[in-house]
Image (cartoon, helix red, strand yellow):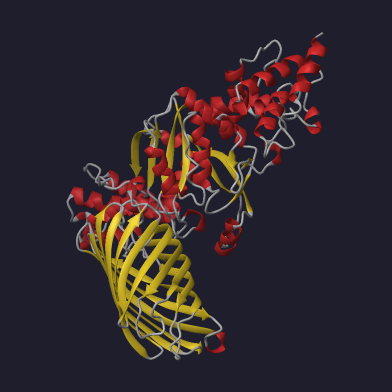
Amino acid sequence: MRLIWFIITAALLLPQASAFGAADEQLLSRHRDDAYLAELIAKARQLRLADRPEWRKLVHYVPDLLSSNVHGMVDSPQFYNATDGKTNPQSELEATLASFYSDIEESGTQQNPQCLFVARYAWLDEQLAFDPQRLPRQVCKRYQQWYDGLNPSGLTLIFASAYLNNPSSMYGHPLVRVDAKDQNEQTRLLAYAITFAANTDETNGIAFAVKGLSGGYPGVYSVMPYYVKVREYRDFENRDIWEYQLNLDSEETDRVLRHAWELGSTYFEYYFFDENCAYHLLGLLQVARPDLDLTSQFRWWAIPTDSVREITKQKDMVKKVVYRPASATVIHHRLRGLNDQERRLAKDLSTKRVAVYDPALSELTANRAAAVIETSQDYVSYRRAIGKNDVADPGGLARELLTARGRLEAVAQKPEVPIPEVHPDQGHGSSRITIGAGRRSGQSFQELSARATYHEIMDADGGYARGAQIEFFSLALRHYDAGTTRDSGTTRVEKFTPISIISLTPRDDFFQSMSWKFSAGWQRVRTPNGNEPLVFSLDGGAGRAWSNGDDSALWYALFDGSSRHNSALASGYALGAGASVGGLLDLSPRWRMHGYVRSLRYFLGQRDTTRTLGLEQRFALGKDIALRVDFARNRESERSYNSGTASMLYYF
């Protein structure tokens, strides 16, 4: 009778969706209770579990772009139990229920589906109340050992600030720390961290960019000791770390960790702009609560700072924020507390130009000598961490400095590094729309421009790296009023820049950083016959930058190179070189000025010498709105002209 009832029930269910395919049958135990499985499937359909947000999050279903259907974002075939599981949530749910009857025994190379999909099992058990007599529960030793090793008490979202010299981290990088029950704020380095990244050993920045933009790498979750990431970020890459302690209870924490276990054996195709570390960590965290929707707004791109901002926007999601400055940040603050003589002495001690028993050190008071030695110690450790062993036996030097410091009767002189007033989640929005009007060569125009992401050197620095510019997909449209010039009454694309990066890192006696810039895109260029074609340009430069003591001014000098390509140019191209110098000056927290001079001599192809003398000003009216006024004196194709623009900037 039970068999007849099951056949009738299955016949009623089959027209809607298949519970499992032929391939799935191989996973099932020969002792499966078919009648109970049919009961579970019927109840799941009655409750519409496949349409619930919890199920959609666990299998990472998202809406199709051009239809009302959905698809799973996981690209590993082993993640799905149904043959059509990637596109059919109902079929995948039913095949998952069926897979729980598998008699696969756990080993070093395989897991029973109850253990492999431990988060799905836990949620379906909550909804359907599995009868352990009819659906025996498996013992998941590997998962339990992993969970016990984490010993979780909570989760913390970690944000490492931007690092421009690594293409994968130029926006910053988030990860999730698993805080253990037996740890405190002093021992958090011993915790484990969950991170998502492209699985590659690629060191070529161009190759990484191309493959990262096109999904050429598998993106994977991994768990590693937190101190490894701290050392990488704070010591190697000079990145400040922000910790956002999440207000999750034990069950919410366990939901995230169970899902992290499921994702540890899968992969996603990694895309730099959207399916990246920021997006997929949000996808992991949103399983904590049924009402959390952290990823739907990131349809086109996901910026790490925006992901942090999305977390902080959630009610009762963050309970505490902790700032951990990078080693270089601490050294910079130490140096600000030293006078010129003490700075020179600290540098000489760290390079063995003077010994710890030098009279110049002994003449200082105990506290000042301690400050000098501690600065030298930190600098030696920093140089060793980044692989710059430019003194003989740096380990021996570190011990000498430590011994000398121990002989001084003085308290620790380490300065209290102030927490930045603006947290990464509190800066301006990473997208921007600009509406402006101006005149060029006596011709009036109106301009509308938009930037997809993320920050430029004229924007407010709060929450962003000072002296850094990273802009992707900037477009400017301009309409010229009626007049006597050939541009009169026309609307045209003035500029389209897919990528523009500037890194102005100040140099001093301790940090010999190189400044550089790179951009690629299309811009209007004047030719000798008066035409202004839209020309593709590749521009770059390298040089140095300097800052004053209070960071209100930043000066730079760069050697520049440029290439232009368009059939309207002589020989179809122009190749040139030159230089640019300029300075950023903050007259107040809201008012920034940027004056610059650029000169390029194009000596191959279309020959020309271009010069620009410009002054840009930005006045912030609020966090996400600003007024900007730009003036420039330009020279192209042996013709000089003036231009000026007044604009309103809106960030979102």
Residue, x 50% and y 41% (percent of image)?
Answer: 295
Occupied quadrant, residue 15:
top right
Relative to 289, say whether 313 is above or below.
below
Q: Is residue 506 visible?
A: no
Residue 234 seen from this side: yes
Relative to 170, does residue 1 appear above or below in the rendering?
above
Choose between 86 and 404: the one closer to the eye. 86
Residue 515 location (% of width, % of height) = 39, 67
Left or right of 320? Residue 165 is right
Q: Quadrant of residue 388?
A: bottom left
Q: Look at the picture and state if 81 lies above or below 627.
A: above
Residue occupying the point 78% across, 13% down: 5
Q: Position of residue 534 (x, y in %)?
A: 49, 77
Q: Is residue 388 left or right of residue 130?
A: left
* Relative to 524, 605 lies left or right: right
Residue 263 higher or lower than 241, as above or below: above
Furthest-top residue in this view: 1
Q: Is residue 573 left or right of residue 83?
A: left
Q: Position of residue 537 (x, y in %)?
A: 49, 75
Q: Is 349 or 646 nearer to us in this picture? A: 646
Quarter of the view holding residue 493 = bottom left
Q: Could you tell me which quadrant the N terminus lies in?
A: top right
Which percent across, then down, holds residue 626? 28, 58
Residue ID at (61%, 25%): 48
